[in-house]
Amino acid sequence: MAIQKIPLENLHNTRDLGGFVTKDGRKVKPYRLIRSGDLKDASENDKKVLTDRYGLNMIVDFRTALECKDRPDPEIPGVSYVWHPIFEEKKSGITREMDEENDFLEDFTQEALSGHMSAEDRMNMLYLQMVSSPHVRSQYSRFFDMLLAHEKGAILWHCSAGKDRVGMGTSLVLYALGVDKETIFEDYLMTNEFTKASVQAELAAVKERELVPDLEVLMTVRRRYIETVYDYLEKTYGTLDKSLEEGFGVTRQKRDRLREMYLEG
């Protein structure tokens, strides 16, 4: 299928996962599962499209406290909001308070631009952390439980750009539903297409031009990252199916229930 973003005025990486075909020939139901970047710039019409046309009634926010403070989600009537940060607020022995000037992701970005390691290698390490960290895995596990509890309407999950934390979470959801790896990778990489214009506009405004190549790496995705994650899961757990159950707590019973809820046919 051609991957389509939801046509919105101010949100450029918001997608309904409906229509993805699973390995057994079924399809993901439309108007149930939505991935996105942050919602701060949503217009009033965007909100209406998401609620009236797509049935949105729950938002799950994967961002850190600082990200939420800098770009808070808008209130949308009839939509519940859950703050569910994927990364810990405490890293390297330093507690990050809600009102501090920086947080883990900001520190990570600064390190990635420091030149001590290539930006792409830094990003690859970030992805490995998303599957090797017990805390991060537990947060994705709890997200699966939210999906299992969401009987009606659409649930939307987002981070800042909708590419890394959301890309990883979405890949796990699609795999649990039975979508093949190549289709999952294709969806993951489409973020580059959907955010291309906004990324180029931001890079054009950067005064320190020597930073542009590394910033572009940080603002886009690479196939290498998702392949590294899947290789790690297969080597660590034996199979991807085992990684879902042993690493993320998604048992066979939970997978069957997810498919009952979110697949048609």
Image (spheres, grey):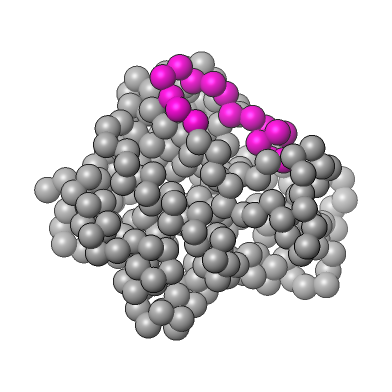
Q: Between residues 128 and 206, which one lies in front from this camera angle?
A: 128
Farthest right residue? 208
Residue 39 is a magenta residue? no
Q: How many marks?
A: 0
Q: Residue at x 85, y 58 (%)?
A: 210
State the image quarter where residue 120 is shown: bottom right
Q: Residue at x 68, y 57 (%)?
A: 218
Residue 196 image position (x, y, % from top left): 58, 46
The part of the chain drawn in magenta is 66-81
Q: Between residues 173 and 223, which one lies in front from this camera angle?
A: 173
Question: Is 62 situated left or right of 35 in this image?
Answer: right
Question: Is 35 situated left or right of 72 in this image?
Answer: left
Residue 28 image position (x, y, % from top left): 25, 47
Question: Is 88 situated left or right of 78 in this image?
Answer: right
Q: Between residues 106 and 26, which one lies in front from this camera angle?
A: 106
Q: Is residue 81 above or below residue 65?
A: above
State the image quarter where residue 237 is shown: bottom left
Q: Residue at x 43, y 37 (%)?
A: 156
Q: Residue at x 57, y 52 (%)?
A: 86
Q: Is residue 183 above or below residue 205?
A: below
Q: Is residue 11 above or below residue 180?
A: above
Tell me if I can see residue 223 in this picture. Answer: no
Residue 85 image position (x, y, % from top left): 58, 47
Tell me if I can see residue 185 in this picture. Answer: yes
Residue 119 image position (x, y, % from top left): 72, 66
